[in-house]
Amino acid sequence: MNHQTNHSVKQPIHNKRWLIMTAVFIATFMTSVEVTIVTTALPAIISELHGLAFQSWIMSAYLLTTAITTPIYGKLADTMGRRNLFQWGVLIFTLGSLFSGLSPSILLLIVSRALQGIGAGAVMPLTFTIIADNFSFQQRANVLAFNNTAWGLSALVGPLIGGFLVDQLSWHWVFFVNVPLGVIVMLLVWFGYHEHVSLTKKLTIDWWGITWLAVCLVGLLLAIQVLDSQPAWAFGLLLIALVSLGLLIRQERRFENPLLSPKMFHSATFSIQIVTATILSGVLIGYQVYFPIWLQSLYGVSATTAGLVVTSSSIMWLIASFTVGTLIAKFVPKAIAISLIVVMLLGYVTLIFAGKTFPVWGFYVIAMVNGTGMGIVISMNTVLSQHLVPSTMVGSATSILTLGRSLGQTVMSGVYGAILNLVIRLNLHSGISFSQVNSVVSSNHAHHLADQALINPIILAALHAVFICVVIILVSVMVINWLDPNRKVIH
C-alpha cells in the first residue's frame, strides 16, 4: 500500500531497516517476556514482601495502565510521529523495571508495575506500526511473522529465565534483566531510525475521550477481578463500564479530532478484524491456562510436561504465521478465518465430551491446531487492520487491535475462572469441601487424596463448562466472519 502524501508524519526513507527490526524484536521480547517471567517469580515476591492480599495487583496494575494508555499512544503516534514516542515508551518501561526491582514494599512494587505498563502501552502497538511504516503490504506479513518469533521465544524461555533468576539470585533480578535490554533498544532506535515530523495542525487532545475510555477500562477490569468473589460489585462495575462506553462513543462522534476515530469502523471488514483478534485472544488464554490444569489435576503429569502443551502451540503459531502473506494474496479473508475456526472448533467439541480416558497426546494435537489457526488468523487481522485504514490512522488502528488482544485475554481469564469456581461449588457433595478440590487442582501430586475418585468428576465437569464457553465464543466469531461483506482478495 502506498502511503498517502498528505500524511502528517513523513515516512522514514534512509533508515537502517535491520537496526530498526533488531530494536523492534528486542522490544517485543522485553514486553512479552515480562508477563511469563513475573508469574514464575510471584510466590517468591509474595513471601518476601508479605503481599498475599495484594498479589493479583502485581499483574493487574501492569495490565490496567497498559490497556488505558495503548489507544492514547496510538493516536499520538499518528500525530507526533513514531520514533520519539517509541523512545519514550521504552524509557518509561525500563525505569518501571528498575523501580520494580528496587521496590522494598508491595505497594511500591505495584506503583512501579503501573509505571511499566504506561511504557508497555506505547511499545506494544508501536512495534507493529513501525513495521507498517518501513515495509510494504506484501512484505509486512513475513516481517510480522519474524517479529512473532520474539513473542514465541519469550513464551519458551520466560519461565526458565524466571525460575533460574529466582533460584540463583533473587526475585529482584526478574525486573533488572529488562534494564540493559531497554538501553540497547533506545540506542538502536537513536542511531538507526530517523523520521521527519511536520505537524500539519495543532494537536488537540481529546481529554473527555481519554477520561471515558479510562473509566470504561478500569470498570471492566475491576469487574473481572471481583466477578468470582463479589458478583454484586462486579455487576455494578460492569454497569459503570457500559455507561462510560456509551459516553465515549457519543464523545468520539462529536469531537473534531477524536481519540478513537469512528471513521475507522466505517469498514465492516476492519471492524471484523478487530473483533476476531479480540475473541480469539480470549480463546487463546483458555487453552493456555486450562490444558495444564486438566493434565496436572486429572492425569497427574508434571508441571513441565503440562507446560509443553502450551509450548507446542507457540511453535506452531510461529511456523504458521510465515504462511500468512501467501494466504492473503490468494484467498478472501473470511474464507481463511472461517475454515481455520471450524477446525479449531472440532477440537473443543471433542473436549466437551472427553472423559478420564481421553489421551494426553490429544491435548497436544488440539493445542498445535490452535497455535496454527491463531498464528494465521491473528497475524492476518494485524496486517489487514493496518491496510484497511488511511495511512494517517495506522497508529490508531494498530493500538485498537493491540488493546483488543490484551482485553480479550484479561476479560476471558476472569470469565473462565468464575465459571470453573461456580461449577465446582454447584457440584460439591458427600462432605467434599471447596478447599479439598482446590488442593487437587493446585497439588504437585506428591500425595494423592483419599477422596480423589470423588473429586475428579467435579473438576472434569468444571473444565467441560469452561470449554463449552470456548465453543460458544468460537461459534460467535465464525458467524461474525461469515457476515463480512467483502468477497474479494485484498491487495
Image (spheres, rainbow, N blue to C red):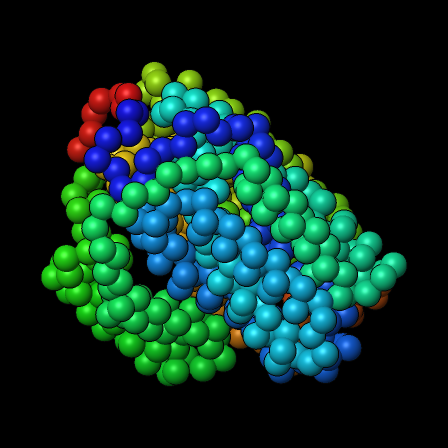
Among all residues in the image, which is located at the extreme left? 254
Frontmost residue, 119 versus 91: 91
**Quarter of the view holding residue 365:** top right
Frontmost residue, 133 versus 34: 133
Q: Position of residue 197 (x, y in %)?
A: 34, 42
Q: Position of residue 398 (x, y in %)?
A: 37, 44
| Residue 468 seen in render | no
Give me the residue at 32% from left, 46% from top. 78
Q: Left or right: 351 with respect to 272? A: right
Q: Left or right: 83 with respect to 247? A: right
Number of on-image labels: 0
Give me the residue at 37% from left, 83% from top. 232
Is the residue 368 above or below the residue 457 in the image?
Answer: above
Q: Position of residue 301 (x, y in %)?
A: 76, 50
| Residue 78 seen in render | yes
Give me the residue at 76% from left, 49% from top. 160
Give me the residue at 24% from left, 31% from top. 4
Q: Left or right: 236 with respect to 179? A: left
**Quarter of the view holding residue 383:** top left
Q: Position of residue 96 (x, y in %)?
A: 60, 65
Is the residue 353 above or below the residue 325 in the image?
Answer: below
Quadrant where the C terminus sits is top left
Quadrant where the N terminus sits is top left
**Quarter of the view holding residue 106:** bottom right
